[in-house]
Amino acid sequence: MTISKDLIRGHTDTIILNILNQGDSYGYQVSKSIRILSQQQYELNEATLYTAFRRLEKSGDVVSYWGDETQGARRKYYKITATGQQNLAVALQDWEFAKDIINRLITDTIAKGDVS
Amino acid sequence: MTISKDLIRGHTDTIILNILNQGDSYGYQVSKSIRILSQQQYELNEATLYTAFRRLEKSGDVVSYWGDETQGARRKYYKITATGQQNLAVALQDWEFAKDIINRLITDTIAKGDVS
DNA sequence: CAAATTACTATGGTTGTCAAAGTAATTTGT
DNA sequence: ACAAATTACTTTGACAACCATAGTAATTTG
């Protein structure tokens, strides 16, 4: 919602993997989880969410299966794979690394000795 | 270089504004400053840099002028405007805000009471 | 005197995201 | 009982930022 769109770009897959890492889930539920985790500050567009699911499935980070709901709407569940868990761990490290670099780039000044 | 592309997306304008906030500069120099500030971890593509300059000029965040080099290649200098300085300040706040939310989204778990 | 560096520009393509609309079932409010 | 809201998934078309590549042109280095 309030958060600048481009700042969160590229985190979608990681966000989804983090949620699925806590248990299988489906689109609508993931969507709600994101709202809760962000404390109502961020809402993922549906199209973006389902696009991400397809991307993650293609890359082998998640697998899907239809739930056997006897009542209520049908639900497609997603499950994180071992590959997905590995990639989640890598993404978390990448984020720690990126944070430092971005902080330097947008707040630091260039020392005089640095000029080439 | 090493930093994941999508993680830095959306920061380009802020990075440039931060550098110009320390004094007028031109494309090639800004490019080098970015390399130095990121400690060789990030290199901005030339096309991206000049696209950003055009975008920033259009939005009124920077103004440009040709340098009066008597020797050496011609240089187009960019200067941050008052608007640009205001937007830089806003972008820095947005980043602090975004960092928190992203951290929650990719590392936190959902408490049981949160489930709706 | 060729190769590397400095410096800017233009073209075409990829990718992630979004708005909008559609389908369809269930649940809630009156 | 029936409309409205909610749950749940999908498709289409568009956009914006970014990138690879190539080009122009001057200067500096080996």
Image (cartoon, coloured by chain):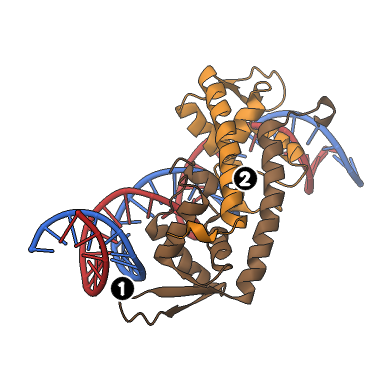
Chain colours: A orange, B brown, C blue, D red
Q: Position of residue A110 (x, y in %)?
A: 54, 59
Q: Position of residue A7 (x, y in %)?
A: 60, 50
Residue position for label 1: B73
Q: Amino acid at mark 1?
A: Ala
Task: Please determine whether, in this image, residue B27 is positioned above or below residue B43.
Answer: below
Q: Nearer the viewer, residue C15 or D3?
A: C15
Q: Amino acid at mark 2?
A: Asn
Residue position for label 2: A45
Alpha carbons under labels 1 and 2: distance apart: 47 Å
Secondary structure type for disc 2: loop
> Around disc 2, counting alpha carbons within 10 Å, would you say few (fewer than 14), some (14 to 19), or many (20 or more)?
few
Residue A92 visible in this rendered orientation of the protein: yes
Secondary structure type for disc 1: loop
Q: Position of residue B50 (x, y in %)?
A: 42, 65
- Quarter of the rendering containing residue A72: top right
Front tag of 1 and 2: 1
Q: Chain of mark 1?
A: B
Residue name at image x 38 percent, y 58 percent: B46
Q: Nearer the viewer, residue A23 or B3?
A: B3
Q: Chain of mark 2?
A: A
Q: Position of residue B89 (x, y in %)?
A: 68, 63
Residue name at image x 54 percent, y 19 percent: A81
- Quarter of the rendering containing residue B19: bottom right
